[in-house]
Amino acid sequence: MIIYPLVQIKKQVAIGQVFTIKMVFQFFGRRMALKQISSNKCFGGLQKVFEHDSVELKCKMKFAIYLPPKAETGKCPALYWLSGLTCTEQNFISKSGYHQAASEHGLVVIAPDTSPRGCNIKGEDETWDFGTGAGFYVDATEDPWKTNYRMYSYVTEELPQLINTNFPVDPQRMSIFGHSMGGHGALICALKNPGKYKSVSAFAPICNPVLCPWGKKAFSGYLGTDQSKWEAYDATHLVKACPGTQLDILIDQGKDDQFLSDGQLLPDNFIAACTEKKIPVVFRLQEGYDHSYYFIATFITDHIRHHAKYLNA
């Protein structure tokens, strides 16, 4: 576990701050709340997995974090990855092959799970595209989901605060990317929080969930039947309502993706909205590629470079 509480306490005492017992307890408590599950050396850095008790989700959550060699000597930018339906924190770190590029560019990469787990909610494990493994990066407003299914607040607030507190990252240099449901998540997180993320990219994102079967199922269950509430978590609608953004958006989409032809992803709607609002987006339709991690692994270095350009500027 990478923790430096004594150093930080000494620094603050040196500038005249008086620490009470309660303050010291809180200081150490925040930093000792992480349980390390695994640690593996990779391209000179460390790929770790931690578990913690989430305040937002009210359950234990795991996240993966890659610490590049540069993290040993100073603070690094943070790049957040959001995975797709059915995934855990393991899929991206074991299949995408991102480590070498992250190591070379000095990026700390964080990959959370895709939903709360073990909440004992009736129906959470009945289907693969709703409930467990399918949090859709929204804050649910409907019973029985609203108590635990708050993935939007988890990935935009709680998790970054946890990472900033416990690891050598620069809170001012943060970007986000993802795949499929996670691509949707990355786009909405960036669009809903101007200035929070330096860059955003996505692989085969669900671009217009209010109009696709996956989105309609998830949003009606988590957010209720009022479809006007759905638009707050729809990248295409967020772009339409956006006064402008400095984000440079990169999207890769496999041309042979079955979910593209099934009407689940709807990138054309997003591109049209970006064009109308003059928001820069690079959309690359990749001949012969599908929706799998083979597709992601092929182009992951391009995406790491895209983010490094802004994070290391």
Image: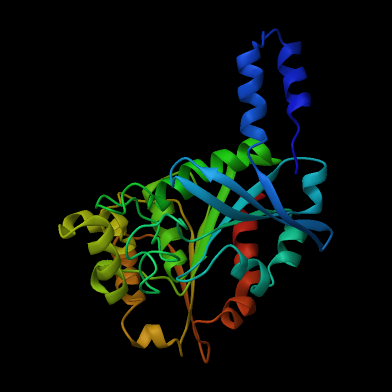
Residue 247, x across and y down, in percent: 46, 54
Q: In the figure, is residue 148 to the left or right of 229?
A: right
Q: Answer yes or no: is residue 169 visible.
A: yes
Residue 219 location, quadrant: bottom left
In front of the other: 190 or 133: 133
Q: Residue at x 58, y 54 (%)?
A: 62
Q: Answer yes or no: is residue 171 visible.
A: no
Q: Quadrant of the N terminus?
A: top right
Q: In the figure, is residue 80 to the left or right of 74?
A: left
In front of the other: 79 or 122: 122
Residue 301, x across and y down, in percent: 66, 70
Q: Residue at x 44, y 47 (%)?
A: 57
- Asked if 95 appears above or below 109 in the picture, the reply is below
How does the figure colour the protein chain or chains? rainbow
Residue 129, x across and y down, in percent: 37, 72
Residue 93, x across and y down, in percent: 66, 66
Q: Residue at x 55, y 38 (%)?
A: 161
- Asked if 230 appears above or below 202 in the picture, the reply is above
